[in-house]
Amino acid sequence: MKKNTVKKIILPLLASVVCLFNSCIGISMDIQMNRDGSGKLTMEYRISNMLDSLGSFSGNESLPTIPVGRQDWERTAERIPGMKLTSYSKRETAQDTIISANLDFSNPNALVSFLTSSYTGGSSGENISINHNGNTGSFDFIIFNQPDAEYDTNLISLFQSVFNDYDLSISFSAPGNSTMTITDGKGNTIPAPASAATVSSGRRVSMTMDVFNIINLPQGLGVKFNW
């Protein structure tokens, strides 16, 4: 394969993966919604140490940076009325940097604003929406849009090995019963992928899926919570 052909294939794939939740490979996100629209957001990032030098590659300088320090999280929260960082921790292993943060939000719009600013560099306003009406509401989140590109099978195998054991987990709870619907990247309801572990109804609903399986979905992936 020619060098320029490889570059055309690998850079879009890298960009799509690296931009997923601000360059994270693994992420856990839990949303607890109160009746009045306030609540708590708990997030944990697992950032592969392999990505530390990615920004130095030609063509990747404009990719969004990762909020790794407490001050990064505080600055992001302070820019959004109704959002407050309540706790933060960071630890490192031989493979990953693991960052955990808890944030309180006073209204649903603060939650959407924060996620929009944190997800793909703030360009995902059309991918996150919330409607709240007293005790009921809905929360729509497009997790991944499949890029219009074809990738070499050897590269797919490479990335499958790199992303092994990295998951994306999202959960939601509200007073009373909640339901979760799986969608494609356009918000259309689809059956849950076979590789996804889901709890679709109850006090707490959730979906967990291997990151490689997410980026390998031909139509993208999203979730919709109703309560």
Image (cartoon, rainbow, N blue to C red):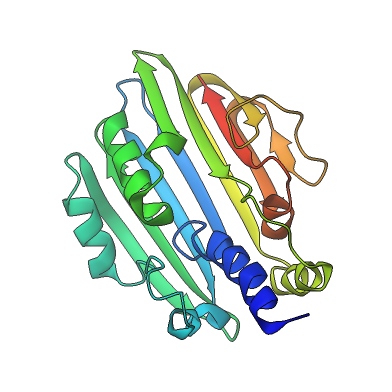
Residue 94 vs 161, above or below: the answer is: below
Q: Name which residue lies at 23% across and 68% down.
A: 71
Q: Nearer the viewer, residue 53 or 8?
A: 8
- Left or right side of 226 for 132: left
Residue 12 vs 41, above or below: the answer is: below
Q: Tag count in the figure? A: 0
Q: Nearer the viewer, residue 140 or 105?
A: 140
Q: Picture quarter containing residue 106?
A: top left
Residue 82 vs 174, above or below: the answer is: below
- Left or right side of 5 for 144: left
Q: Picture quarter containing residue 93?
A: bottom right
Quadrant position of the N terminus in the picture: bottom right
Residue 188 is situated, as x and y percent measured from the top left of the image, at 63, 25
Please say whether residue 25 is visible from this viewpoint: no
Q: Picture quarter containing residue 55?
A: bottom left
Please say whether residue 44 is visible from this viewpoint: yes
Q: Name which residue lies at 67% across and 28% down.
A: 200
Q: Name which residue lies at 72% across and 66% down.
A: 165
Q: Nearer the viewer, residue 14 or 81?
A: 14
Q: Name which residue lies at 48% across and 59% down.
A: 44
Residue 147 is situated, as x and y percent measured from the top left of the image, at 61, 51
Residue 28 is situated, as x and y percent measured from the top left of the image, at 54, 53
Residue 162 is situated, as x and y percent measured from the top left of the image, at 70, 74
- Left or right side of 112 for 30: right
